Every structure is written in C-alpha cells, then in structure tokens.
Image (spheres, rainbow, N blue to C red):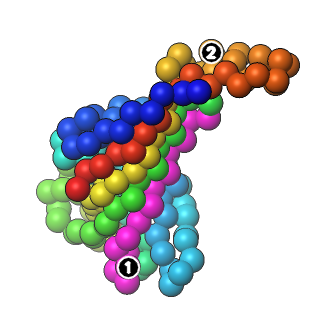
Amino acid sequence: MGDHKNLTEELAVNKIKELAENIKTCMFCTYNENRLQSRPMSVQKIDDLGNLWFLSDRNSSQNAEITLNPTVEIFFSEPHDKFLTLHGSATISYKREIIEELYDPIVKVWMPGGIDDPNLSVIKVVPEDGYYWNNKNGKLVAIAKMTAALVTGKTMDDGIEGNLQLQ
C-alpha cells in the first residue's frame, strides 16, 4: 500500500507547484448547467498562494461558463507518475499588465492577434482543495512495478497520496 499524507496551506501550495508546473497541461473543467465541460489548457503561472493563471479567449466556452458558474475542476496527469485534481473558483480579467506578464508567443496559435488581441483574457483559479497521487520512485520504476504486479498478481503500490487543503 502507498503512503497517505494530507497537506495544508503552504505544503499544499508547494505540492501544487511541484506537480502542475512539471505537467503544465491540464483538463480544465467548467459547468454548463449540471454537466462538466472539459478542454485541455496550459497553466501560464502558479503564484505563491497556489492560484493558477491561464490565458483564454473572451468568446470561449470556458469564459461563458465561468461567467455563469465560477466553480471549476482541474485535472493534471502524467501517466504512471503524477496526478493532481483541484477544485476551486475562477474569475476572468482583462487587465493588460497581467496579460503581458503571462503572455507566451505560443498563444498566437489560438489567438492570432497575439498579445494585442482584444479578445485575450486571463482566468485566475483559486483552488480550495484537491487530491494528489505521486509515485515515489519515478515513472520507469512505476512501470516496472506495474509489470511485476501483473506477472505476480501482487500489489506493488509505493506511491504517496493525500488531500490538499488550501482554504
């Protein structure tokens, strides 16, 4: 069995930064009435409070859904190695200084007007809580142990997992 280690406040923020900054791309989920809507998005920044910052199109489905319901779910996954789920609340901003701080030229793929695109917005997600799974020994060992478990029929879970509490 793996270890269970719940993390609060600063330790929870550190775990979010450790996992999310490495994985980078998440499934960003909003609510359309009672249905979860998901799309891949790249986190641009994770600040010292654990808030996640994204760039988005003003006219996107995620912006429309956040306007109606700010509750979001975010899922990061690096198969066999690292997993992170976060539950929180999102806000949308159009502040130029924040857009300029977060902007990366790759955003032009989705926003042809680049940094000056008038539809460019910022989504800030304030996580309230979450859950993480972290393999202690890295991906190659995890895959080897999974293979051994399949062959022998014995569980070889050596991960660490736990709740994250930020508020």
**Image height check: is 145 above or below 71?**
above
| Comes first in the chain, label 2 or label 1 | 1
Q: Quadrant of the C terminus?
A: bottom left
Percent across and percent down for residue 24 are: 44, 41
Q: Residue under label 1, please give it.
A: 69
Relative to 148, is 14 above or below?
below
Q: Residue at x 23, y 68 (%)?
A: 93
Tell me what residue is drawn at x 35 percent, y 45 percent.
164
Q: Mark 2 and mark 1: span between their CA atoms?
A: 41 Å
Residue at 54 percent across and 19 percent down: it is 138
Which residue is tagged 2? 141
Span shown in magenta: 66-79
In the structure shown, which secondary structural element does the residue marked by tag 2 occupy? helix
Q: Is residue 140 left or right of residue 11?
A: right
Is residue 76 magenta-colored?
A: yes
On the question of residue 165 being in view, the answer is yes
User: Within the image, what quadrant is residue 144 found in?
Assistant: top right
Q: Residues within 10 Å of mark 1 (few under 14, many from 20)?
A: some
Where residue 113 appears, x then y in whole percent?
Answer: 37, 62
Residue at (53% x, 81% y) in the render: 34
- The three-letter amino acid code for the residue at tag 1 is Asn
Q: Nearer the viewer, mark 2 or mark 1?
A: 2
